[in-house]
Amino acid sequence: MTEITTLPPSKKCAYCHQLKPLAEFRRRTGKRAKGVSRRGACRECRKLREAEASLPPVRASVAPALPERQAGPAGPLKRDKGPVSISKAAAPEKAKPPMAQPRPASRPERAGDTRGSAGTAGHKGKARPRHAAETGRSLPQQRGPKPDPQDASALIPSAKGMILMRGHSDKGRRWHQEIDLELAVTLVKEHAAIVVNRRTIRRLYSNKDFRAYILTRDNYTCYFCGQYGDTIDHLLPRAKGGHTTPDNCVCACNLCNQTKADQLVEQFMSR
């Protein structure tokens, strides 16, 4: 009967690659490690690694002394050259930056162009002034003196024969409208507007301000009967071409204003 011999459990070292018993290896302590699990380094390899780790590190800059070569028949002893840096030997020479080239002129000089020359001392770096005949542009029209605010003859209508009139409402809001030249002249002559420029006039009073001005000017006295008045009447009725201007409006009482209606002053006073 043959006897079966069982060999002790062994493991191959991960460093020296030799089969050694499990007692030479440390146990694994992880949660998933089984009871037979061992680490990869044996005891001898582990001691060698610990000894190498305890040695002081060798500086890379300090190179060991090289042995001297024996002098040949041609001359004295020579020392071996140190190791050549691979990075320096293999690195190609850096390309030198190109020489700074002079900047080309931004604009070629033309015949007769005297920019930057001694003759243009008063216009250095600037284009010489040109006349309107050279450029082909017409000079802006020079404005004349500002017209008199009361001079209605200075008004010039637009191509449509209109004059711009502007003013403000009782609440201070600005407004503007176009009127014909005849009405604009009448308003200026009867002191209801003034001339702003040759194409614009400005109304002086709003409706509320105009009423207060007429009543205050006439001291609240009726123009026709002399009694107390608080209304405004037109001497030339609006139905016959009159306008609401200081020269055409007077203070009147309510009775005279209704009785006169659209009659002329001569017709109403002759009754």
Image (cartoon, helix red, strand yellow):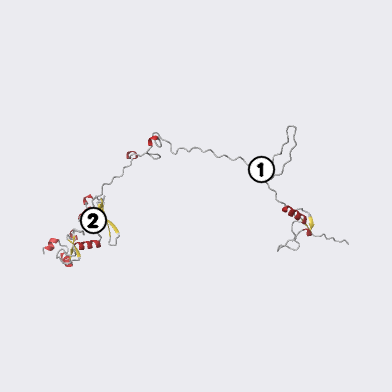
Give x and y (percent) for residue 154. 23, 50
Q: Callout 1: 10 Å neighbours few (<14), some, many (20+)?
A: few
Residue closest to the eye, 193 or 71: 71
Report the label total: 2
Q: Earlier in the sequence, mark 1 or mark 2?
A: 1
Q: In the displayed structure, would residue 142 be above or below residue 243? A: above
Side (left or right) of 134 relative to 161:
right
Query: Which quadrant of the structure image shows residue 262?
Result: bottom left
Side (left or right) of 157 relative to 47:
left
Q: Dot 2: what SS?
A: strand
Disc 1 residue type?
A: Ile
Q: CA distance from mark 1 to mark 2?
A: 99 Å
Give x and y (percent) for residue 176. 28, 56
Give x and y (percent) for residue 254. 18, 67
Q: Dot 1: what SS?
A: helix
Disc 2 residue type?
A: Ala
Q: Which mark is residue 86?
A: 1
Q: In the displayed structure, would residue 257 be above or below residue 179? A: below
For the point 64% across and 42% down, the residue is: 88
To which residue does mark 2 refer?
A: 193
Give x and y (percent) for residue 134. 34, 38
Q: Callout 2: 10 Å neighbours few (<14), some, many (20+)?
A: many
- View extreme (top): residue: 74
